Image (tube, grey):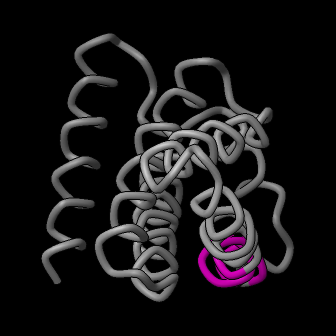
Amino acid sequence: MKWIGFLLGLIVLSDSLTALLGRPIVAPFMSAMYATANPVWMIWVAVIIAAPLFEETFFRGFLFKGLESTFLGPIGAVLVTATLWAAIHIQYDLYGIGTIFCLGLLIGAARVVTASIVVPLALHSVASLVATIEVAILG
């Protein structure tokens, strides 16, 4: 639950900064995706369950474990996986990718501290749930 609290704090800070900068809370890509989804429940499943399961298994599971055992160590593994994870989200602009990088740092820290991918998977799913709720309400 502590990690969920950290995540919610990051989301509040991120959304507040985004609003202060006059940027939309919901990325145009997400609004378009949600508006054209048919049936819409498939977006919820894909974004909240499928994507986090695949991405966390690969980035904070397979890739993290391999990088952690090199000269990079755990901190380097967090930085590299957060960077690569953010880089695959090319559907967003640079601001959005930067936000995803920050989220990746938090998820990577959870991976290091808990030595498990369960907490990172839960954090990713909750972040995606919040983003999908924001799209449904604001999009």
In the displayed structure image, the side of residue 96 where residue 24 appears, left or right: left
The dominant secondary structure in magenta is helix
Tell which of 23 and 12 is nearer to you: 12
In the displayed structure image, the side of residue 63 where residue 135 appears, left or right: left
Tell which of 64 and 36 is nearer to you: 64
Residue at x 25%, y 23% (from the top left corner): 17
Total count of labels:
0
Tell which of 53 and 135 is nearer to you: 53
Residue 30 falls inside the magenta stretch: no
- Depicted 32 relative to depicted 24: above or below: below
Could you say where residue 114 lies in the image, as x and y percent from the top left? 32, 80
- Depicted 105 relative to depicted 8: above or below: above
What are the residue bounds of the magenta stretch? 42-53
Residue at x 35%, y 53% (from the top left corner): 106
- Depicted 62 relative to depicted 9: above or below: below
Residue furthest to the top in view is 21
Could you say where residue 38 lies in the image, as x and y percent from the top left? 86, 73
- Depicted 72 relative to depicted 119: above or below: above
In the displayed structure image, the side of residue 72 where residue 109 appears, left or right: left
Q: Quadrant of the N terminus?
A: bottom left
Residue at x 64%, y 39% (from the top left corner): 86
Residue at x 58%, y 35% (from the top left corner): 27
Could you say where residue 3 lies in the image, as x and y percent from the top left? 22, 72
Residue 51 falls inside the magenta stretch: yes
Could you say where residue 28 lies in the image, as x and y percent from the top left? 66, 32
